Image: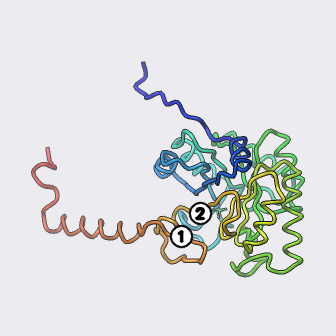
Amino acid sequence: MANKEIKEVKKVTTNTLQKMKAAGEKISMLTAYDFSFARIIDNAGIDIVLVGDSASNVIAGHETTLPITIDQMIYHASAVIRGVDRCLVVVDLPFGSYQSNSDIALASAIRIMKETGAHSIKIEGGEEVIDSVKRIVSAGIPVMGHLGLTPQSIYKFGTYTVRAKEADEANKLRRDAKLLEKAGCFGVVLEKIPAELAKEVTESLHIPTIGIGAGMHCDGQVLVMHDMLGINTEFRPRFLRQYLNLNEQVTRAVQQYISDVKGKSFPNENEQY
Ligand code: KIV
C-alpha cells in the first residue's frame, strides 16, 4: 500500500463560498505562488488561495504585474496546486492573455485549467471583458471578477490611489459588478475603493465580494502573502495589516548562521556524520 496518509478533507468550492455569504461567514483569501507556502496556508485553514499575477512583483521583482506571462503563471499555479488539499485555488489570467478577444481569453483560461489543475480563474475588468467571462463560464470554468484598482491597468490610471471616489467611476463599478454577476462570476474582488461603495455593491450582489483595501463590509478579505508576512516591508498602505516581520526574522536568522559558520560553531559534533 502507498505510504500516503489518506486525508478526509471537505473541499472549499464555489458553492461553499455562496453559502458562506448567505450565512454571513467571512471568506479568507491569501495569495501564494509556490508549493511550500501554499501547503502552510492551506493547512492553516484558508478558504481561497489566489495565484496572483502579483507574482510579477513579489517573486520576479518587476515594478508592475504586466510582464508576467501565462507560462510563468502556469508554473506557479501548478506548484500551488501540488501543495493544497482543501482550499479553492484561483489563478489570475495575466495581462495580454485575454484582452484581445474572447477566443484568446477562453484559450488562456483552458490552458490554465488543463495545465495546472487549478479550480478557477480571475480576470480584471467589467463590461470590457463580459463576453470573455460568459464564454469561459460556458466552458465550465468558474470565474472571479476584479474591479476597482485593477493593477493591469496601472498605466491607464497613472497612480495606485483609491479608485471610484468620483460618481462616474463609482456608477460604472456598480454596473460592472452587476454585469459580472449576471455573466456567471462566482465572486468579485473589490480593490482599493471607498468602504461605503464596497458595502453597497456587496449588499446588491448574491455572489461574494472579496475586498483588498475596500473596507469591512465585503464578504471576504484578500491580502498579498508577502505583504501580510512582512517579507516585503517597503509596501505599507493603510489597508495592510502586517502579521509578522519575516524580513527582520529571516535577516536575524541569516546573520546568526553567518556568524556560526565563521565562528566555527556550526556544524558541531552532533551535526556531522
Ligand atoms: O495579483 C494579486 O495578488 C491580486 C490581489 C491583489 C487581489 O490580484
Residue density around tag 1, few if under 14, some if 14–19, many if 20 or more, within 10 Å: few
Q: Secondary structure at mark 1?
A: loop
Q: Quadrant of residue 204?
A: bottom right
**Residue corresponding to mark 1:** 241
Q: Is residue 43 above or below residue 92?
A: above
In percent of width and height, residue 114 lies at 69, 39
Asked whether 102 or 184 is in front, the reply is: 184
Amino acid beneath label 2: Leu
Q: Position of residue 61 (x, y in %)?
A: 54, 69
Q: In the rendering, which numbered label is found on residue 223?
A: 2
Number of marks drawn: 2
Proximity of marks 1 and 2: CB atoms separated by less than 8 Å:
yes
Secondary-structure class at tag 2? strand
**Looking at the picture, does residue 159 appear above or below residue 265?**
below
Please tell me in which quarter of the rendered image ligand 1 is found: bottom right
Viewer-side label of 1, 2: 1
